[in-house]
């Protein structure tokens, strides 16, 4: 069995990773399934630095191949914020994803449609038990909606509008989202690397 540790406790991310990696014959183990697995503080200045910190820590702890991503929402009108701080935007007052979405919409309430550009970015790092490391990148462009819409997805999906589709990311099914999402793009780059590495296993 080809097992891989996903360095995340985010249920939404685990669903996406499991869905995409199942086609490659890879079973994803979440960090929460490893008793005593470290909680890694995201102290990096970039998405890739944070992903690397998490992947290395889980690889070292488990001895298994470890995959981590760090992703976030970058809003043009906010100078690229919340960026690497997406998961902690508005803390400690903003606790839930809905709180963060509401705060972001308030920050942009006077910003016109043409200036509400934004993109999701994802850096992904794979750490192999023998010390080899691989990275990939994905991003998807859109704009911030004027109100939350859609019940699928997680995080900022309900306020991230895809202009060519006329819906937010949260209106897409899991399969539709995987086809276009920043995480889906990064993982599709990683899949052939994983397949090659697992074939090398004795």
Image (spheres, helix red, strand yellow):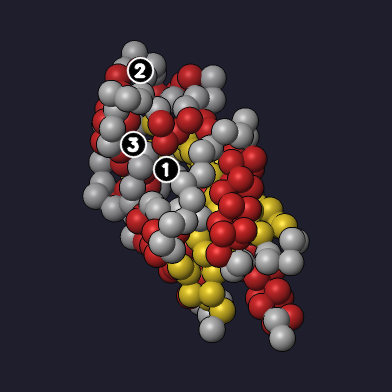
Residue 49 image offset from top left, x and y in percent: 64, 40
Residue neighbourhood size for the residue with mark 3, other residues' Cα within 10 Å, grouped as few (<14), some (14–19), many (≥20)? many
Quadrant housing the C terminus: bottom right
Q: Residue furthest top?
A: 110
85 vs 101, nearest the viewer: 85
Q: Which residue is mark 1?
A: 162
Q: Which residue is mark 2?
A: 107
94 vs 75, nearest the viewer: 94
For the residues marked 3 and 2, what is the alpha-carbon distance in whole angstroms? Answer: 13 Å
Q: Residue at x 75, y 61 (%)?
A: 132
Quadrant housing the N terminus: bottom right
For the residues marked 1 and 3, what is the alpha-carbon distance in whole angstroms? Answer: 10 Å
Q: Which residue is mark 3?
A: 159
* Residue 54 against residue 62 in the figure, above or below: above
* Mark number, residue 20: none
Residue neighbourhood size for the residue with mark 2, other residues' Cα within 10 Å, grouped as few (<14), some (14–19), many (≥20)? few
């Amino acid at each position: 069995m080809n097992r891989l540790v996903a360095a995340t406790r985010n249920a939404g991310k685990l669903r996406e990773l499991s869905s995409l990696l199942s086609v490659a014959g890879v079973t994803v183990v979440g960090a929460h399934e490893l008793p005593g697995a470290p909680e890694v503080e995201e102290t990096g200045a970039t998405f890739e630095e944070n992903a690397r910190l998490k992947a290395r820590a889980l690889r070292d702890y488990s001895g298994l191949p470890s995959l981590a991503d760090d992703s976030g929402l970058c809003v043009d009108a906010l100078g690229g914020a919340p960026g690497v701080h997406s998961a902690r935007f508005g803390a400690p007052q903003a606790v839930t994803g809905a709180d963060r979405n509401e705060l972001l919409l308030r920050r942009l309430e006077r910003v016109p449609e043409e200036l509400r550009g934004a993109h999701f970015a994802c850096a992904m790092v794979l750490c192999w038990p023998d010390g080899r490391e691989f990275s990939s990148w994905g991003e998807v462009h859109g704009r911030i909606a004027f109100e939350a819409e859609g019940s699928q997805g997680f995080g900022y999906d309900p306020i991230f509008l895809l202009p060519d589709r006329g819906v937010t990311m949260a209106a897409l099914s899991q399969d539709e989202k995987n086809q276009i999402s920043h995480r889906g793009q990064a993982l599709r780059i990683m899949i052939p690397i994983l397949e090659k590495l697992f074939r090398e296993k004795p």
